[in-house]
Amino acid sequence: MNRTTLITLKTLTWIACLWPFALLVYEFVTNTLGPDPTANITLTTGYNTLLLLILSLAITPLRLLSPRLSWLIKFRRLLGLFAFFYASLHLATYIALYMNFDLSVFKTDITKRRFIIAGFLAYTLLVPLAATSTTWAIRKLGGKRWNQLHKLVYFAAISGIVHYWWQVKPGVKSPMNLTIGLFVLLAARPIFKYVQKRIAHRPVTV
Amino acid sequence: MLIRKPSDIPSSEITPYENYKEYFTRRRFLRNALAGTAAVGAAITGANRLADVFDPSISALADTKLQTVKSPLSVTGEPLTSLQDVTHYNNYYEFGPRKNEPSENTGTLPTRPWTVKIEGKVKQPKTLDIDALLKLRPLEERVYRLRCVEAWSMVIPWIGYSLSELIKECDPLPSAKYVQFLSYYDPKVEKWASEASFYSAYSEGLRMDEAMHPLTLLTIGLYGDVLPNQNGAPIRIVVPWKYGFKSAKSIVAIRFVDKQPPTTWNQMGPSEYGFYSNVNPNVDHPRWSQKTERRIGLPLFQQRRTTLMFNGYADQVASMYNGMDLKKNY
């Protein structure tokens, strides 16, 4: 891939990733966040966290599909960091608008409410990943250890989806699409790897 | 691409209140033009509004505005939630799980002809026509707080009369201890019902004394007009001291029973939604605190407010629960 294409695609990715945030800012400034601004911000930031996290998890299976897609790796960190960006906004919304900066509220929530526990766990798991996202950190840790550490993203994504299911009312199926997406991407890894192994070990016929 | 929850209608597209009323009037006029010549006649001749209401041959719908008397039971000193928000931020799961969906999807709800069955432990079961129900008692405007179990709230000027007035007409037997309300149910019209795991008619219920309490409103309108479909047209119940889901919409049957009736959300999540479901800041929902609420329509940092015991109606209703453990009977 040449430099111009890469820069163009990266720019487009930035715009797409920032779009929901820009809309929220615009709606805040113009006072058009809707009937329930608090709920709107919470849902938008939470949904986009999970969406970006799942998109970042799509890159490896796509690369396994074809070596011609290997350039996609250049976008994984960007998607992951934007997922962390929305997760941080989501957490900030909780602290400011639900907890109201009252630590005793958090204490009750983190001990009593399982959806808060799952959500907080997901965020906690993302922190070391965001912290070690720089090229310097990769070098410092070494590729192998870095890779091992970043396996945490699977647990973060699963906790995030569980957090969503536990938040909605019983019977409501709105987290279904994201759940199917995550499931397919997690299942694709071992399947693709297995198939590739079979191909690699196929005896050469003359 | 990022898929975002569809944003709210830009303010530029919101029909101003005056035009909105006019639009509804026009729609209603068209509907009535098909429904009955009496209504057409009244609309064309511009008959006196008061006369319309008291003339039994003319549906109350023929008028642009329902004639109401103010009620001393109204909340005072709290600004009303806008008509736009009251009609575009709804929980009506049979018509879609998102708050904006009922306003888009309830157009197919057939509100005429409409009857309400009175059944169960009554002297004489009967079927009442909606137009008879509208005229049973003078209509009152009652401004009530509405507190949703999801921790948001509104202030709404409902129109109706006390349910007790209807119950008196129904001659319930002494064995009737509870009243069950059944909502309209047709999965062909309510295509979203299965999405919310609703596989039978929405059911709600009250204890007899709760149903007979003057605050319990048999509701047929809001903001001076008949109920918009998404708010539970043509007839619903409003119980202001209980979480919103207790106030069943689009009622087709009122059943008097001797045992506590099964209720929809209680069956879906018994630990989350009790039969009583009185607004109570001291009893948390398992997933969130009920100590505070978000008032709909206020700016981001002004939404949060303290939730009041029995939603502020403690003086009128608390005595019904004397001696009851409200933590157990949530």
Image (cartoon, coloured by chain):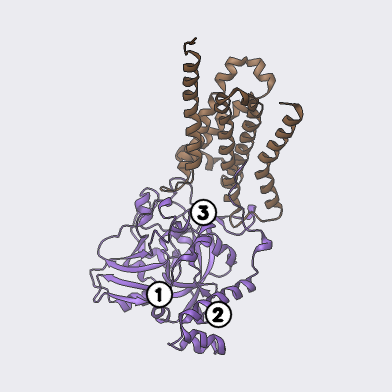
Chain colours: A brown, B purple
Q: What residue type is labelled 1?
A: Pro
The label number, if any, that marks residue B98 in the structure image: 3
Res B243 → quadrant: bottom left
Q: Distance between the residues labelled 3 and 2?
A: 30 Å
Circle 1 or circle 3, nearest the eye: 1
The label number, if any, that marks residue B64 in the structure image: 2
The label number, if any, that marks residue B113 in the structure image: 1
Please report, as a chain letter, where disc 3 is located: B
Say which residue appears at 69% left-offset and 19% top-offset: A136
**N-term-proximal mark, 3 vs 2:** 2
User: Helix or strand or loop: what does disc 3 sit on?
Assistant: loop
Res B12 → quadrant: bottom right
Please report, as a chain letter, where disc 1 is located: B
Task: Confirm whether circles 1 and 3 share one chain.
Answer: yes
Crowding at label 2, few (<14), some or many (≥20) Cα neighbours within 10 Å?
some
| Residue B58 in the image, given as x and y percentages of width and height | 46, 85
The label number, if any, that marks residue B126 in the structure image: none
Say which residue appears at 45% left-offset and 39% top-offset: A114
User: Helix or strand or loop: what does disc 1 sit on?
Assistant: loop
Q: Residue farthest to the right?
A: A4
For the image shown, how many numbered marks are present on the structure?
Answer: 3
Q: Which amino acid does label 3 sit on?
A: Arg
Crowding at label 1, few (<14), some or many (≥20) Cα neighbours within 10 Å?
few
**N-term-proximal mark, 1 vs 3:** 3
